[in-house]
Amino acid sequence: MLYSIQRFLAPSLLVLVAVSPTAAEIDLDELDFVEVFRGVSGATSITHAGDGSERLFVTEQSGRVLIFNGESLLTTPFLDIRQRVRAGGERGLLSVAFHPSYPSNGYFFVNYTDLSGGTVVSRFTVTSDANVADPDSETIFFQAAQPQRNHNGGQIHFGPDGYLYIGMGDGGGAGDRSNWAQNLGSVLGKMLRIDIDQGTTATAPDTNPFLTTPNARGEIWAYGLRNPWRFSFDRLTGDMFIADVGQNAMEEISFQASDSTGGENYGWRRMEGSNCYNPSANCNSSDSLVLPIVEYANLGGNCGGSVTGGYRYRGARHPQLSGTYFFADYCTGEFFGAVEENGAWTKLGPRETEISVRTFGEDEGGEIYFADSGVVYRIEAPRPSPQISDGGVVSSATFQVGSGLAPGSLATAFGVGLATTTAAADGFPLPNDLGGGSMSFNDATAAPQIYAAPGQRNFQVPWELGGLAEANLTVTVGDETSPAVVVPLARISPGVFVLNSTGQAAALIASTGGAVAGPAGPFPGSRPARAGETLEIFATGLGPVTNPPATGAVALADPMSATVESVSVRVGGESMNVVFSGLAPSFAGLYQVNLELGDSPPSGNAVPLVIQVAGVDSNTTFIAVEEPETTPTMEVAP
């Protein structure tokens, strides 16, 4: 029995990593800072709920959380706790973070200064009205006394690991006279990491670096920070960027890689940026301190410089900005970017503005916003002329050209300016025009579109190109056509779709109605396949078929379109019995190979699977196969 792959594979066709031009090419002066809305009083943070509503949530220093619904700033606050907040200077309601499971549990967290001047991180719950939270639902998870009125930190973020991170300043004053930032017995001057899913109190995760260190606070994830007013995570890589406000000489951006196990010492007060501070010399003789990836000198004085950390751009609207980290200076109005190449970071700018940037934020799509006290802006870039990246036309299954793209298969083109908007085909036959543009081979043959965005287009390679060794591909957006790129073609170019970064094959267990043949957990209902079961493997590029549909049209279930060339499958290096290979019904360009596992197939959670068509191997993917039960033998006494 054949099952439609659309419900779980189609989204994976759209979530692709764009290949963008080098971000160092970005000219900050060409960016537009578009006013999105105004009416906020003392903005301190901007974020989204991750619930698909596309709303923006803005915290006001006085103690309110406001909602922008895409059209207007709602008059009724989402949350109003002004009577609990001590606001002024660097104190107040400083940020909000929504639980990763907010759509199902309604939990969100705030960081604020209480009436006694201490830091509070607490949880609230939304009411039955999605635009109003319950102010009486507060549960306090974390508290810390603050010895001074400044350097409270204030940012909270859920990390890719699901834990809540809390940025804490060094307690205020000048020069960290008590050396709190280097004292592991204090939470001041630290990045904290807590688990908020173990009841109604915060706990330190077992993997925190100082959990077993005598006299150390278990919540500490990293230390040596002066005032990490804003920090963020790269939504693509999981890396952390910490903007640490300097004393009177240097402003800095610190970095923590996503594979870090914590414990970094970012230097304060021993160092300010890459300079010694206290002591004034030989402050890093053991090279134990982590130096900033970017820094700049401030002008000294009361407000000669105060870095406001931002985000690394990962949105779809402006792929030419991809990978650029944006930040600014509150005091000077200078706007910066930073880009990385081979591990080395280069600072872009500054661009002079008259905006005192207090905070940055992201929406659900990864677009970046920033705010002064009362106005929220979005970063926009001019739409570039359409251009397909060099080597940017690849199989949608493997992201590789290999020996060429097969007519009838699914492919992806990466580049810039490839669409005016993001759009997905809403039915079949697939449209030739999508997202404000189209694609054409040899200036004559249209390529049906599955998905369009400024940085990529997913399409079907036309069947009409059969027999050609190569073809020229162009993208037309509005009245502009991109330079042609030469696309190698091949009769056969097999590629198996994968469902995650570990190479899990798009393989379903037929008898279950669609469970993924993978380890239990990563996908709903997934489990290892068992001996004798039939698997459905989804691929593309398997070549000519009988009863071929028109380009862009769905394959029929009766009669089915079977592959012309012979197809074999190896699981763990062993050949399996193929019972069908051909186009998957009710989709365009998608192939399906049904195979029967033998009585004793290779087992494990990552068993290699390779499809071979007419002697050409696909990419290597993986499935999970349960070890067959063995029947114990009975020994007979002599």
Image (cartoon, rainbow, N blue to C red):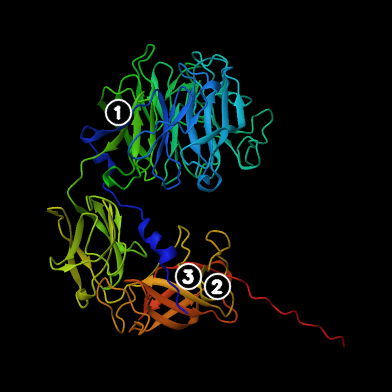
Under mark 3, the amino acid is Ala
Say above or below: 544 vs 169.
Answer: below
Residue behind mark 1? 335
Residue 101 image offset from top left, x and y in percent: 53, 46
Q: Secondary structure at mark 3?
A: strand
Question: Can residue 263 be seen by looking at this rendering?
Answer: yes
Q: Nearer the viewer, mark 3 or mark 2?
A: 2
Where is residue 587, by image quadrant? bottom left
> Along the horizontal axis of the image, is 35 left or right of 216?
left
Viewer-closest of 524 and 457: 524
Residue 94 image offset from top left, x and y in percent: 48, 26
Q: Indicate which disc residue 512 carries.
A: 2
Say above or below: 562 vs 53.
Answer: below
Q: Quadrant of the C terminus?
A: bottom right
Where is residue 497, by image quadrant? bottom left
Which mark sits nearer the N-terminus, 3 or 2?
3
Residue at image position (43%, 46%) is 237
Q: Secondary structure at mark 1?
A: strand
Residue 566 image offset from top left, x and y in percent: 37, 84
Residue 419 image offset from top left, x and y in percent: 23, 52
- Pointer 2 local density, CA inside 10 Å: few below 14, some 14–19, many at least 20: few
Residue at image position (47%, 27%) is 64
Which mark sits nearer the N-terminus, 2 or 1?
1
Residue behind mark 3? 507
Under mark 1, the amino acid is Phe
Q: Secondary structure at mark 2?
A: helix
Say above or below: 231 vs 116.
Answer: below
Where is residue 391, by image quadrant? bottom left
For this orientation, the residue located farthest to the right is 638
- Pointer 1 local density, CA inside 10 Å: few below 14, some 14–19, many at least 20: many
